Amino acid sequence: MTEVHLVEHAPAKLVSLPGAAGRALAASRIVDAVPDPYEPGLWRLRAGSKVGAVALDVPGGGTVRLRITPKVSVGRLFFLLGYSLDPRGWRDGTVDLAGHDGLLPAFAHAVERQTDRALRQGLLQGYRSTEATAFVVRGRIREAEQIRRRYGAPLPAEIAYDEFTTDIAENRILRAAVERLLRLPGVPRTVRLRLMHQRARLADVTPPVRGQAMPGWRPNRLNARYHNALRLAGIVLDGASAEHQAGGLRMNGFLFDMNKLFEDFVCVALRESLTAHGGYTSMQADNIYLDEDDAIRMRPDLVWYGDSGAPMAVADAKYKAGKPKGYPDADLYQMLAYCTALGLKEGHLVYAKGYAPHAGHVVRHSGIALHQHALDLGQDPRDLLLAVSALAERLVGA
């Protein structure tokens, strides 16, 4: 087994790897992997914005275990995540990480603790629609199915009924997340034992079927004690999408996209700050077009509309590594297109902390001002939210 440890967006690292292992990493597209042109057996590996842990089964034998550490602390990552999911109900300290500084161990511990808290009062029950073939009529007869399958015979009957059970979407999602974590390498033994206990509590719930979509759920008063656990479980199940088989390469792990995390946090925090100024915000708006024929669709991360419904400000979040000379020019072209389509004179790009704290550019012959802001994710959560509030004031004054 070969183990590789990288840091998100760090300079390329030279690693000694067998050729098959290096090619497996390159094929996975999780990291940039190219053979060193001067030293046989050495590969240049560079991680992008995906963090987490993955085990790759190399065709022909062997396994590569890849661990990518985020630049921000795990505790800060959970704050960004928690605020994005529930800005009013989930703040710093909601999840106890018990000193785990690795992303996967911390997530596994957090899911287990939140699942334990959710199930402390017993498993949630609810009504589930069920269709069955039975010799005792219960609920209603599915007449069309009865005729199609039984040709008019009265029994057995094709029936449909609502069953009050623990085998509902909320419990199935929790069980799926627990089962998923138990299959991942790198979960600490103590956490694994507690996860096995949670699986035993969910033993009467339908186990997940690989490849089958998870049922949906909606937050309400009845499942309030499940909310945090379900949100974390959803992240685990989404991050487990690294598991697949293509071209003889099998991956099993948990990956988290820092691009999406930063984008979600910035948009949600701006939306909360802009609430005091009236109007409404649209995130990932899909009804904006660049051309008159509505053929070129654009999706800015956030558009703030005034009470009249007219667009007042536009912002886009970019989790990118800054260059010594500034931010990428392509982002400016994209923001210029947003401003042109929306009829705005100012546009705002928001980056994770880079080389420049703020830059402004006025476009020739148009008068459109493009602003580039930087948020320092390493600062205290309270100061980070204050920085977003100050940014919202800039948008309002645009």
Image: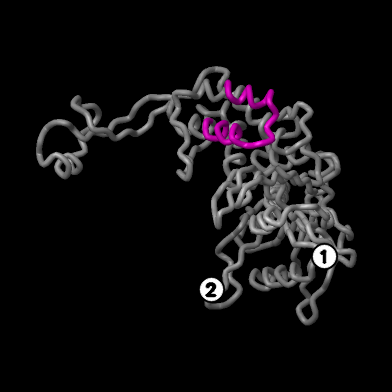
The residue sitting at the bottom extreme is 365
Kindly report the secondary structure that dominates the magenta region of the rendered protein: helix
**What amino acid type should be assigned to the residue bearing mark 1?**
Tyr
Mark 2: few, some, or many residues within 10 Å (few <14, many ≥20)?
A: few
Q: Position of residue 200 (x, y in %)?
A: 52, 21
Q: Position of residue 215 (x, y in %)?
A: 46, 40
Q: CA distance from mark 1 to mark 2?
A: 30 Å
Q: Position of residue 162 (x, y in %)?
A: 33, 30
User: Is residue 365 in view from this perspective?
Assistant: yes
Q: Quadrant of residue 89?
A: top right
Mark 1: few, some, or many residues within 10 Å (few <14, many ≥20)?
A: many
Q: Does residue 113 sit above or below 54 in this rendering?
A: above
- Quick check: 172 left or right of 382? left
The secondary structure type at the circle numbered 2 is loop
Residue lying at 63% horizontally and 22% vertically, measured from the top left: 194
The secondary structure type at the circle numbered 1 is loop
Mark identifier at residue 327: 1
**Discs 1/2, front:** 1
Residue identified by numbered label 2: 294
Mark before the other along the chain sequence, 1 or 2: 2
- Judge whether residue 179 is colored magenta: yes
- Quick check: 215 left or right of 233? left
Residue lying at 34% horizontally and 34% vertically, measured from the top left: 129
The residue sitting at the top extreme is 121
Residue lying at 68% horizontally and 54% vertically, measured from the top left: 25
Image marks 1 and 2: residues in contact by CB distance under 8 Å: no
User: Is residue 303 in view from this perspective?
Assistant: no
Residue lying at 61% horizontally and 57% vertically, measured from the top left: 284
**What amino acid type should be assigned to the residue bearing mark 2?**
Asp
- Judge whether residue 319 is colored magenta: no
For the record, the magenta segment spans: 175-197
The residue sitting at the left extreme is 152
